[in-house]
């Protein structure tokens, strides 16, 4: 995995002046690129921020966000603790999201502080040379190439090659029938970045690809197993925008795809990998970037504690607690007992990379984190009902009668139990500083 780490090391020379300019800050230094000041307090913890429902709702910033980041950035514009933004959004490039955050928060954010749901796809090098079909919205072809894929086909491109396959919308049916045979290359894998715009088109063509082994000139083979590899990013069933109630997320699209496939074939849809929160893979990636920031700042204390701050019990809290469980149980990533416990917790090996894949995905410095805990903090400004009374005792269990997590993650009440419940992100940062006895100087 040398190439992966070299790639991230190569990102850090990004122009600090450019990042400051985008944040509207003149004369300050980069948020985390700089030399150590021996007179300043050094952190032994890092912060993982969700974005939607924690910092923003749709395009509107949450008022507490700027107050929180006033505590996190010093007078020189430097972060006083390592910070990574971990979002399940997947419809833009990391740099675009970093620019948006810089504008909203008024502090310099670089793409190296942002993890999109699709970011871990960089590690799946065995698919990078294959012909892959990508689904989602936004610049999906650019995103796919940015994470390493070289031969990419969008659903729209596939529809143009096979116009007779998309017929739900009568107005989009071809007026003149053409030769249904196309010389389109065989699809070798499917990558789902996020919820698409035209669900019926994407569902139809993805099912067609899965049931024809990637060759749409063939008829459906409903009994042929296994289907070609399927990788999915972002399992959020719902997310919080400007509306009063949560909106459908990519997880809802996956529910549709899984149920259509099973209804047709009688078999479960299988994923090669699931990325984004609450997947352990995403938290490994975040922990690595936190560690790398600390190293860039020449902070000597090891980062032993992580705090995952989010608004969604089924992704942010579940994911942070699942990773915390892994950190507590880990002796090494090849420990069969630790892996077995992770599989038991999720209900599926899909969420846990298999032992033979680990050497290909992570070098030892990425696979073996320095962190020993990942604590979860729930805010009440997003998916979690903001009008619900905040319990005085966070140990009181939050019961969910309906599990909103992904099919391949088993419901475990302990995993949706937040370590702390606070009103907003500013209160979360204050609480964490208090817990860590951290006073920025």
Image: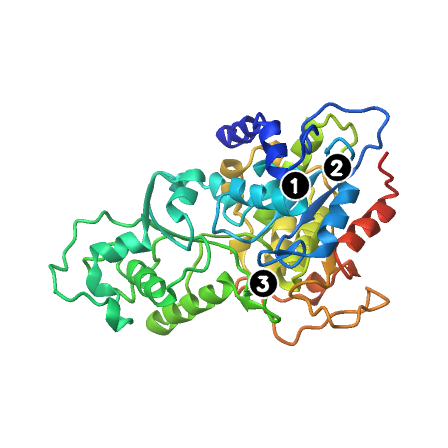
Q: Earlier in the sequence, mark 1 or mark 3?
A: 3
The residue depicted at 54 percent of the width and 64 percent of the height is 406
Which residue matches tag 1? 287
Q: Position of residue 326 (x, y in %)?
A: 67, 49
Colour scheme employed for the rendering of this structure:
rainbow
- Crowdedness near tag 2: few (<14), some (14–19) or many (≥20) residues, C-alpha within 10 Å: many
Left-right relation of 304 to 181: right
Q: Position of residue 296 (x, y in %)?
A: 68, 27
From the image, which quarter does the C terminus lie in? top right
Pointers 1 and 2 in contact (CB under 8 A)? yes
Residue 223 or residue 12, whichever sits in front: 12
Which residue matches tag 3? 241
Left-right relation of 112 to 311: left
Report how far apart the C-alphas of labels 1 and 3 lie in the structure. 27 Å
Secondary structure type for disc 3: loop
Could you say which quadrant of the image residue 71 lies in?
A: top right
Could you say which quadrant of the image residue 230 lies in?
A: bottom left
Q: Residue lying furthest bottom in this view?
A: 401
Left-right relation of 365 to 213: right
Q: Earlier in the sequence, mark 1 or mark 2?
A: 1
Q: Earlier in the sequence, mark 2 or mark 3?
A: 3
Seen in the picture, residue 60 relative to 116 is either above or below; the reply is below
- Crowdedness near tag 3: few (<14), some (14–19) or many (≥20) residues, C-alpha within 10 Å: some
Residue 1 visible in rendering? yes
- Crowdedness near tag 1: few (<14), some (14–19) or many (≥20) residues, C-alpha within 10 Å: many
Report how far apart the C-alphas of labels 2 and 3 lie in the structure. 33 Å
Which residue matches tag 2? 303
Q: Position of residue 316 (x, y in %)?
A: 65, 57
The residue depicted at 75 percent of the width and 72 percent of the height is 388
Mark 1 vs mark 3, foreground winner is 3
Q: Position of residue 320 (x, y in %)?
A: 68, 53
């Amino acid at each position: 995995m040398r190439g992966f780490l070299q790639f991230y090391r190569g990102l850090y020379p990004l122009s600090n002046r450019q990042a400051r300019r985008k944040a509207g800050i003149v004369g300050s230094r980069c948020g985390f690129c700089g030399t150590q000041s021996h007179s300043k307090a050094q952190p032994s913890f890092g912060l993982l921020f969700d974005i939607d429902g924690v910092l923003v709702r749709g395009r509107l910033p949450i008022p507490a966000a700027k107050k929180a980041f006033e505590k996190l950035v010093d007078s020189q514009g430097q972060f006083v603790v390592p910070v990574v933004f971990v979002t399940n959004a997947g419809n833009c490039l990391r740099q675009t999201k970093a620019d948006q955050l810089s504008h909203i928060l008024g502090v310099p954010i670089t793409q190296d502080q942002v993890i999109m749901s699709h970011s871990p796809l960089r590690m799946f090098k065995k698919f990078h040379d294959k012909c892959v079909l990508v689904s989602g919205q936004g610049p999906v072809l650019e995103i796919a190439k940015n994470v390493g894929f070289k031969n990419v086909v969008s659903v729209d491109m596939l529809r143009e090659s096979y116009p007779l396959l998309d017929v739900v919308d009568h107005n989009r049916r071809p007026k003149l029938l053409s030769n249904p045979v196309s010389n389109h290359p065989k699809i070798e894998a499917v990558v789902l970045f996020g919820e698409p715009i035209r669900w019926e088109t994407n569902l139809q063509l993805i099912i067609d690809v899965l049931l024809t082994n990637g060759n749409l000139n063939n008829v459906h083979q409903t009994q042929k197993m296994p289907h070609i590899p399927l990788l999915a990013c972002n399992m959020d069933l719902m997310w919080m925008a400007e509306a009063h109630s949560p909106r459908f997320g990519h997880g809802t699209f996956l529910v549709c795809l899984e149920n259509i496939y099973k209804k047709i074939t009688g078999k479960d849809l299988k994923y090669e990998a699931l990325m984004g929160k609450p997947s352990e893979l995403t938290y490994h990636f975040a922990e690595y970037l936190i560690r790398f920031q600390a190293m860039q700042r020449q902070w000597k204390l090891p980062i032993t504690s992580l705090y995952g701050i989010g608004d969604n019990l089924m992704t942010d809290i579940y994911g942070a607690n699942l990773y915390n469980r892994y950190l507590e149980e880990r002796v090494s990533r090849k420990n069969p007992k630790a892996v077995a416990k992770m599989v038991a917790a999720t209900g599926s090996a899909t969420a846990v990379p298999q032992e033979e894949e680990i050497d290909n995905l992570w070098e030892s410095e990425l696979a073996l984190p320095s962190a020993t805990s990942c604590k979860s903090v729930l805010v009440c400004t997003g998916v979690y009902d903001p009008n619900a009374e905040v319990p005085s005792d966070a140990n009181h269990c939050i019961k969910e009668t309906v599990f909103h997590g992904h099919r391949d993650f088993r419901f475990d009440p302990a995993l949706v139990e937040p370590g702390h419940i606070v009103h907003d992100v500013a209160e979360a940062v204050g609480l964490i500083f208090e817990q860590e006895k951290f006073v920025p100087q």
